[in-house]
Amino acid sequence: MPEGHSVHRLARQLDDVFAGEAVAVSSPQGRFSDGARLIDGATVVGAAAHGKQLFVEFDNSLVLRVHLGLYGAWEFGGDATFRGASSIGAPRRVGEREAYDDGAAERYAGPPEPVGQVRARLVSAHGWADLRGPSACVVATAQEAAAVRARLGPDPLGPGAPASGREEFTRRIRRSSTIVAAALMDQSVLAGVGNIYRAECLFRGAVSPWTRGVDLGGERAERLWDDVAVAMANGVRDGRIVTTCAGDRPPGGGARVRNEDAHYVYRRQGLPCRRCGTPVGLEALAGRKLYWCPGCQPGDGARR
């Protein structure tokens, strides 16, 4: 599932290419036809993300709310004024590719025929965006969209972050009796974190995944929030998740960090920890894979 940094990149992308533009909205697949009719021809006011939820506001006071889920992805194309990532979405399907075909832009004469199951298509005078496979794609009132956001925890990439959400995150996680590995994936505690950021930031903070939220301590909770905010901001900047420090990577890797050197524990089960040499652990937790280093993250809480 795309993590929060990808959804913020999508919001910026949609804002850059559609804000202030009237758009034709359709549902080639047919499953979103009723919703598409409500916003077809309206002008995009702007797009924003909160955690893994994307909100596109229109000038008729309606909001397109999208959650990509496991398989959702957006694809973009258009003329030379429509600069966009070729696709941003579920890593299992497309990853996040930034290549832009200038030749196609010069030849642009309108959107191509839809390919596959396109849930929603947005078309402006300069380009198009296709949405496939989301877990949620609905048109909501401004009040309904605000209610969804109110149920979410603070977003480390939100307005004024990280300082604005630090206190609220600390309050929410420290009142939780669940272990921090579970609490970090609870979108009502912290919005936008997925499996990779969870594993990597707990490792970087030397926090045992089995520590209960109530036992975390205020200072450690604040440090964890700040590290998540830094890691996710780097993800927005780079278009990928790289959490290792240069000194913990093999020498001679080049300017671009290799995928196999990008993480400390994520998908490195059984391999030696980059810092202490202990084999990285793997365990199932609530249907997701939890990675951690038993040496660097010693158990300081009740293991469940």
Image (cartoon, rainbow, N blue to C red):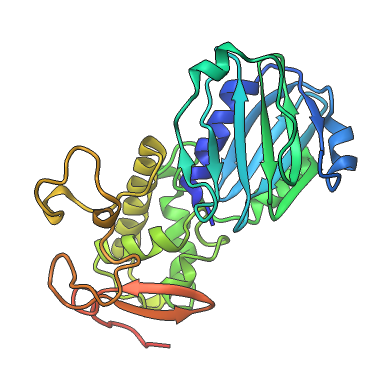
**Is any part of residue 165 visible from this angle?**
yes
**Is any part of residue 81 visible from this angle?**
no
Nearer to the camera, 185 or 268: 268
Q: Quadrant of residue 27?
A: top right
Give the residue drawn at x 72%, y 50%: 147
In this view, 213 is above or below 245 = below
Give the residue drawn at x 53%, y 30%: 12
Is 67 on the left-hand or right-hand side of 200? right
Task: Report x, y in % for residue 83.
Answer: 52, 20
Is 158 on the left-hand or right-hand side of 275? right
In this view, 38 is above or below 271 = above
Nearer to the camera, 122 or 51: 122
Task: Report x, y in % for residue 44.
Answer: 71, 24
Q: Quadrant of residue 269?
A: bottom left
Q: Quadrant of the C terminus?
A: bottom left
Q: Quadrant of the N terminus?
A: bottom right
Task: Report x, y in % for residue 155.
Answer: 50, 48
Numbered marks: total: 0
Is 262 on the left-hand or right-hand side of 59? left
In this view, 258 is above or below 268 = above
Q: Quadrant of residue 174?
A: bottom left
Give the residue drawn at x 56%, y 19%: 104
Task: Report x, y in % for residue 160.
Answer: 45, 37
Nearer to the camera, 135 or 203: 135
